[in-house]
Image (cartoon, helix red, strand yellow):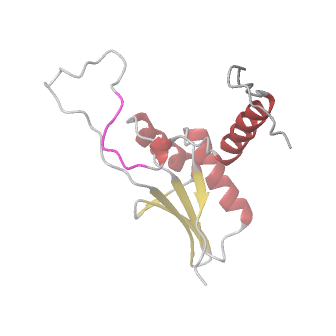
Amino acid sequence: MRLPRHDRTGSLEVKMTPMIDVVFLLLIFFVWTSSFETPEYDLPSALAEVPAGGSEANTDQPPPVEAFDEIVVKLLVRGGLPVIEFGGQPVESTEVLQERLAEVIALGVQPPVIIDPESEVTMERTVAAYDAARAAGADRVLYATAAE
């Protein structure tokens, strides 16, 4: 019986089609599992944006930037009347709430605004507070819920 001869002089052929299939599958996997949320919201930072017309070297006056992790707006009912609390202080109306939120956002920080309504607060008041926060320029407005 004769053994088959193997020519070592022939070139080795590499098939590219399976390799391209694997690359496309990996691409689809990484696009599917990636998160497109900006990482600035996930990491704490004490840096603020430089205001227009200002410079970082100007040390005449420190910038009025406070560190805000989150802004909590509580919606309460006291004596049958609705009350809005911003930073622990009562606010007269949603228009005043919108102005105060706009002042904070004008500082160059963008903390999440958390609306925390009591169970007696109507949905209309809750949505009005949400609309005021969005109109003030807040990007992330969240609702707080009670833990069970």
Judged from this view, the residue extending furthest toward the right is: 1
Image location of residue 64, percent across then percent down: 27, 37
Name the residue: 61% across, 72% down.
Answer: 145
Name the residue: 41% across, 42% down.
Answer: 104
- Front residue of 47/21: it is 21
11 to 146, vertically: above or below:
above
Judged from this view, the residue extending furthest toward the left is: 60
- Quarter holding the N terminus is top right
Please indicate whether residue 48 sits to the left or right of residue 103 in the image: left
Judged from this view, the residue extending furthest toward the top is: 53
Magenta includes 48?
yes
On the image, which quarter does residue 32 sit in? Answer: top right
Image location of residue 142, percent across then percent down: 59, 57
Please indicate whether residue 32 sits to the left or right of residue 105 in the image: right
Please indicate whether residue 30 sits to the left or right of residue 78 in the image: right
- Front residue of 94/35: it is 35
On the image, which quarter does residue 55 sit in? Answer: top left
59 to 67, vertically: above or below:
above
Name the residue: 72% across, 20% down.
Answer: 10
Give the magenta range: 43-49
